[in-house]
Amino acid sequence: MSVRTAWETRDTVDRQGIKYWVSAWLPVAIGIGVIMLESTELFGANHTSGPLHWLWEALFGPVTRARWNVIHTLIRKSGHFFGYGFIGVAWLRAWWMTLPRSSFLPDASLALMGTALVASCDEWHQSYLANRTGSAWDVLLDCSGAIALQLAVYIYMRMMKPKRLISPE
């Protein structure tokens, strides 16, 4: 079931089948799995800098070490923002499909709580790794990404299907 179909037909689909529940929650599970993979020592800044630096110079030309440090930080923080933004949308979609009678705000709130929980656990885990750090600022950045992408979904839904955002009577 595509994302668009899930948004449009949530009141008419049979929610008893396993395929429905897998289609609703598998994207959340995959997103959490990706975060778990990226939360390892292998994806610490000391391991990602070399390959990303090579790729950057292949695409854009040479860069000084000082400038690269800034660029590398921006790439990593953008990854936080957009990665957790997409996880926030996956949570939103899952709650939207699971709670067909609720409106957008409760679903978005649940999605943000799920995103915040995953982000907090990720940062807590990283605080125990030798080459990683746990940061409340990263959790805030992650949640900001989730809010931003959820707002984008809300604006899209408001323009395309405005009645879908209001809870049925």
Image: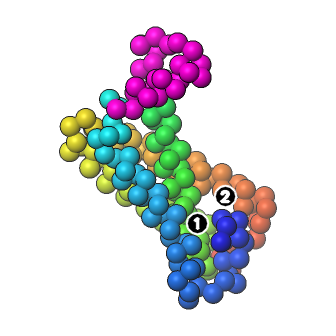
Residue bearing mark 1 = 93
Vertical arrangement, residue 98 with respect to residue 62, above or below: below
Q: Position of residue 14 (x, y in %)?
A: 63, 87
State left or right for residue 96 relative to residue 75: right
Mark 2 crowd level (few <14, some 14–19, many ≥20, 10 Å Cα): some
Vertical arrangement, residue 33 with respect to residue 79, above or below: below
Q: Residue at x 70, y 65 (%)?
A: 4
Q: Position of residue 35 (x, y in %)?
A: 40, 51
Mark 1 and mark 2: Cα distance apart in space? 11 Å
Vertical arrangement, residue 96 with respect to residue 58, above or below: below
Judge whether residue 67 is colored magenta: yes
Mark 1 crowd level (few <14, some 14–19, many ≥20, 10 Å Cα): many
Q: Position of residue 50 (x, y in %)?
A: 40, 25
Q: Which residues are magenta?
A: 47-73
User: Do we see residue 98 in this rendering?
Assistant: yes
Location of the N terminus by quadrant is: bottom right
Q: Which mark is residue 154?
A: 2
User: Do we see residue 135 in this rendering?
Assistant: no
Q: Amino acid at mark 1?
A: Arg
